[in-house]
Amino acid sequence: MIGVMTNLKSFTALALISATLCLAENQAPFACNLRAFQPEQRQRWRILLDKLYAGATQSRELADGYTFLVDIKQMPLGEVAEWIELERRCCPFFDFVVDVHGEDGTVWLSLKGRPGVKQFIEGDMPKLRVR
């Protein structure tokens, strides 16, 4: 429990520093703005995020983020696009890339961006990085 609290305090301090720096540079802070959703949109975003957590079967570290192999049987391509549309409303600091490979049918979703985005993913979306 102490380790969790220490990590939470460290992450909170990092978020506050990041928000201050982002405001000075006219960039969106590394914080999710769940007020960007109507209540039904927030519910749908949560459902899709849970599907992404379940459907991300592999992850690869990138210099500026992560890429995830998405099992389209668990989260079809249309739902990946729907999640991106919602996620970009609350987290405008992400850059999204979807690679759809025709012959083998794989779908890779990349979340990346400016310095600090990778650490945000590590702290806020640990379920995506477990594989």
Image (cartoon, grey):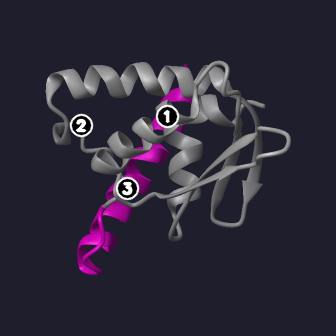
> For the stretch drawn in magenta, what is the main secondary structure?
helix
Give the percent coordinates (x, y) of residue 12: 39, 46
Which residue is disc 1 drawn over?
Answer: 78
Q: Residues within 10 Å of mark 1 (few under 14, many from 20)?
A: few
Give me the C-alpha separation between circle 2 and circle 1. Answer: 22 Å
Give the percent coordinates (x, y) of residue 122: 59, 44
Using the image as rendered, state which of residue 30 and residue 42 is in the foreground: 42
Q: Residues within 10 Å of mark 3 (few under 14, many from 20)?
A: many
Which residue is disc 2 drawn over?
Answer: 34
Q: Is residue 53 left or right of residue 30?
A: right
Give, as a three-letter code, the residue at label 1.
Gly
Give the residue displayed 66% in from the left and 27% down from the top: 72
Which quadrant is the C terminus positioned in?
A: top right
Give the residue displayed 84% in from the left and 44% down from the top: 103
* Number of numbered discs visible in the structure rendering: 3
Tag in front: 2 or 1: 1
What are the residue bounds of the magenta stretch? 1-28
Give, as a three-letter code, the residue at label 3.
Phe
Which residue is disc 3 drawn over?
Answer: 30
Residue 75 appears in the picture as rendered: yes
Please tell me whether residue 16 belongs to the stretch shown in magenta. Answer: yes
**Of pointers 1 and 3, the one earlier in the residue sequence:** 3
Using the image as rendered, state which of residue 51 and residue 1 is in the foreground: 51
Q: Residues within 10 Å of mark 2 (few under 14, many from 20)?
A: some
Q: Is residue 118 left or right of residue 42?
A: right
Give, as a three-letter code, the residue at label 2.
Leu
Q: Is residue 91 left or right of residue 2?
A: left
